[in-house]
Image: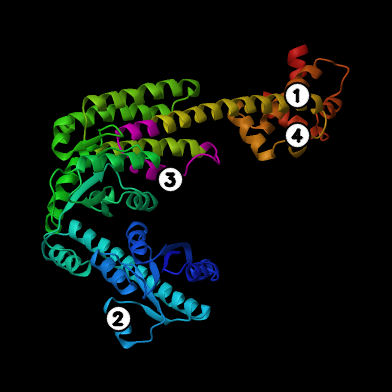
Amino acid sequence: MYSLLLVDDERLELETLRDYIAWDELGFDRVYTARGGRDGYDKALRLKPDVMITDIHMPVMNGIELAKQLYADGCTTKVIFLTGYDEFEYAKAALQVEAVDYILKPFSFEKIRKAAERVRELLHKEELLKMSVRVYGKKLLCRVIDNDGETGREACRQFLDVCEWDKEEWFGLITTTAGLDDTVIEQVENSLSEVVYSIRGGGGKRCTYFLVRYFVDYRESAERICARLEQLGLHAAVVFYPEKLSVEQLYGTVRYLEGLQEFLFYVPGGTVISSEELKQEIPLTEGEEENREIYGRILREMKELLHTQCPEKKADKLETYLLEYWDQLNKNPRKCFYVLEEMSFFLSELYDACAARKKDADFPGKAELRNDIYRAVNAEALRKLCLEFGLTGIRRLSDRKQEENRRGEYVVSSVKQFVEAHYGDSICLEELAADIGLSPNYVRSLFKESEGITINDWIVEFRMGKACELLRDRRLKVKEISRMVGYENSSYFCSVFARRFGASPNEYRGEILG
């Protein structure tokens, strides 16, 4: 939608033009009016309308003078002239100030509508062209900051040409601790007028660079960017380069700022700092091998903890290891690449341990988890992510183990009670499982994991124990005992009994009872 300014010294004609045309249907949602050329000039400078429809013949300042003065002041408003004077000189003057249309009075509303539609299409095409140039300009700048040599120089030449950028014009350069989403970049760019371009580049595209107008105070601009990121929910540190730069200087300066990302990783979110101050603020520890040994030990202990058999103690121990890891890191800051890799490997193992037991709808996917790790804007954010996910994950492991133990105890108890009540009958596992509301395979699995023996073997053991008790009663025949413990075929019963005790039922009775 566009804005429109109507200018005429005749009140009735001005109100008619304003009220009798559905401007919103033609794409104009803001319609302003001005009485005469001088009032129109003041309002055009203040409101900067997209289109101005003005009468030519007005006292003090006519429409031609109004348009000329606005163009001289750099105003880009599109002008449509209205006049009752059908003379060539007026038309010629209108063309000299680049009017987009010229309508004779008395005008019809249809002519006004057609003129408005034409100028709206012209504005739309110009917007698309500007957008295309801007998008292409960003691509060229990405090539400039990512390529040295002839490729970068050619991109630089194309940018100066396509974007009509003066070779002597400068930038200020500001960057953040991490790559930002396109929506965040767009919102920062749209809300801060000093931001000329915002692009990703270098460092695996983890960095976002804001190119600001060279004449602003860079620290203040960095503070405004930092505050805007805070409003958008991103607690990031922001670093600014203290000198103004030409397009040709961007490549080298971006390489320099890339090297500072390792230091910026340890700067707390919400901090604004210059590139000169940054190295003095965070000295990275030398002796990478010694550091790897320290962190390697802690990570090994954390990983071993995932596979221990004491789930109820895991959360407390894991928290101890994680806090020790970050405590060591605060004392000995290292290149953030190693930290990101270590946390990625550890949390991936934790994810696998959780996923192996049970999927949770609210548990992040492995790819999502890895992306979250590498999107962490600084060590502070990564530490929070690792502690939250690590402790949540390990507690879920513990909870699940305890839940499985409780469920296993319930299944074992239910199976045993069922067998004790029905050992003399034909026992059907499907019936038993249905009785406790679980699948037969799950019942088999839980029972064996808990007791170390299959359900069928346990049933045989239980029946054989009962048979031994019944054999003490000499009044009972073996055939009767066989049926009493669930074996209709007495020969098969004797065979099972002999395998279990190494003697037939009668031999066992003779040895035991004499």
- At a point 51% along the width and 26% down the height, the residue shown is 398
Where on the picture, by quarter, is residue 387? top left
> Is 285 contained in the magenta span?
no
To which residue does mark 4 refer? 432
Badge 2 crowding class, 10 Å Cα cut-off, few under 14, some 14 to 19, many 20 or more, is: some
The alpha-carbon separation of the residues under discs 1 and 3 comes to 46 Å
Comparing labels 2 and 3, the label whose residue is closer to the camera:
2
User: Of marks 1 and 4, which one's residue comes earlier in the chain?
Assistant: 1
The alpha-carbon separation of the residues under discs 2 and 4 comes to 96 Å
To which residue does mark 1 refer? 417
To which residue does mark 3 refer? 368
Q: Do the residues labelled 3 and 4 touch (CB within 8 Å)?
A: no
User: What kind of residue is marked 4?
Assistant: Leu
Magenta stretch, overall SS: helix
The spot of residue 118 in percent (x, y) is 43, 77
On the question of residue 335 being in view, the answer is no
To which residue does mark 2 refer? 95
Where on the picture, by quarter, is residue 449? top right
Q: Is residue 83 above or below residue 127?
A: below
The spot of residue 446 in percent (x, y) is 62, 32
The alpha-carbon separation of the residues under discs 2 and 1 comes to 102 Å
Q: Are marks 2 and 3 in contact (CB under 8 Å)?
A: no
Name the residue at the front extreme: 59
Badge 1 crowding class, 10 Å Cα cut-off, few under 14, some 14 to 19, many 20 or more, is: few
The alpha-carbon separation of the residues under discs 2 and 3 comes to 60 Å
Q: Which of 331 and 96 is in front in this view?
A: 96
Comparing labels 3 and 4, the label whose residue is closer to the camera:
3
User: What kind of residue is marked 2?
Assistant: Leu
Name the residue at the right extreme: 475
Span shown in magenta? 357-386
